[in-house]
Image: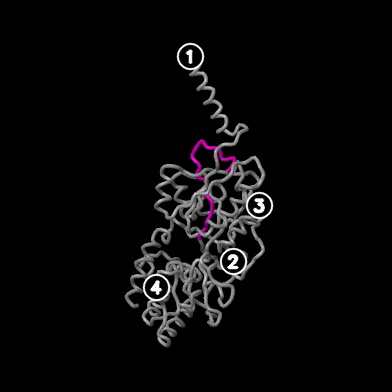
Amino acid sequence: MKLRRGTALMLAVLCLLLCACGGGGGKPERVTLWCLEDDPLRQPLEELIQEYNRSPGDWQQLSLRCFPDEKSLAAAFDTLRPDLLLCSHDRAWTLEQQALLRDLRAELGAAAPEYPENLSLTPDGVGRGYFPLGVQVTLLCLREDVDGNWGALEALLADAADYGREEGNAFFTADSFGELFYQALLTQKTEFHADLLRDRDSPAYLALYNALAGGAFDRGITLSAHGAAELVAAGALPCGAGASSAMTVLPGEGFVIRPLPGLEEDTPLPGRAVGLAVTAREGRSLRSAAAFLRWLFSDGRAGRAALDAGLIPAALSEAPEAESPLEELLLSLGAEHPLFLLPPEGDYGKNQAAFEQAFRAVLRRFL
């Protein structure tokens, strides 16, 4: 008899626990959000999560977990998946190919953020299982006393070579030479494959390749372990190209931030999205994750977070007031140029890491 009563009591307790986890009136466990410590959106999101957790409502609170690097995050992901993952669109595309994104459209309903059509193409999960907050683009930063009215990237590199010969010091560097090639060739309607055997038949590619190599030979172009914006801010270089998110380190005065030379009106602007991937395990309720996304994409919160991180707001109707020259530039670029995400399944997406390493090795021979 005692055994039967004990078994019945255990079954009753188990039933109560299942009801609580199923969202039938009680609150399930917290929504988990993972990110990398150095993600440009980490700090703005951390502040928003604190605000969200203090706000009234019947939704779950959020728990943020930061990882020092990709390796540690991937190891944790293999054993315990978060509800939401802050990541680039490249990572979201990989997750999508592995069928690890959950579709949140039903839970969001009419509150789902809208995206420009060109941002909704890659990955396919944009607006369904992946929600970009902002787009990172490559920009140019330079000292205010530098005459930087270059009509094309090759003109900048010619000035860098002249500066190296005359001053004996470097003038320019880039955080990603591959992205310089990609955008410069895009303005000339030429595809960049990041593959020497295929690209060497392109006159536009060869001209830029030779201009960069010549600038390095004349000591006007350099390589560094430090970011281009950091070097310009410290006075170590007059000019550099880097990610828009890195431009937030520049002081408010004495420096100018511009698009890369050659960007004409209505020219497509390539970039990398950073956003939230819905990676909750199958069977787990998406109700509270959707509640957070509805809150995040309302009242300009997502747009403000993107600008604070040095990104162009990704969603439509996300246009908060600019609070700095960098933010003014980001908003104008988003309004004047069709943004598109660098395709992770294209040649550049596949070859970019190998190309960057090989091209830097070429430049290093001249330094």
Check disc 2 and report its element: helix, strand or loop.
helix
In the rendered image, residue 278 lying in the magenta stretch gets the answer: yes
Question: Between disc 2 and disc 4, whose residue precedes?
Answer: 4
The residue nearer to you, when weighing 178 against 327, is: 327
Amino acid type for the residue under numbered disc 4: Leu
Residue 223: mark:
4
Vertical side of 307 occupied by 110: above or below: above
The amino acid on which the numbered mark 2 sits, given as a three-letter code, is Leu
Q: Nearer the viewer, mark 3 or mark 1?
A: 1
- Tell me the residue that label 1 is attached to: 2
Q: Which mark is residue 330?
A: 2
Identify the image quadrant of the C terminus: bottom left
* Residue 148 horizontal/vertical position (percent): 53, 80
Q: Write the residue at 43% across / 59% down.
A: 349
Using the image, determine if residue 239 lies above or below residue 266.
below
Mark identifier at residue 298: 3
Q: CA distance from mark 1 to mark 4?
A: 77 Å
Between disc 2 and disc 4, the foreground one is: 4
Q: Which residues are magenta?
A: 272-288
Looking at the image, which is closer to me, 195 or 178?
178
Which is nearer the eye, 234 or 207?
A: 234
Helix, strand or loop for disc 3: loop
Identify the mark nearer the N-term, 3 or 2.
3
Q: Is residue 231 above or below residue 58?
A: below
Q: CA distance from mark 3 to mark 4?
A: 42 Å
Marks 3 and 2 sit apart, C-alpha to C-alpha, by 20 Å
Residue 247 in the image: state x and y as whole percent: 53, 68
Q: CA distance from mark 2 to mark 4?
A: 27 Å
Q: Do residues under tags 3 and 2 come within 8 Å of each other at their CB atoms? A: no
Circle nearer the N terminus (1, 4): 1
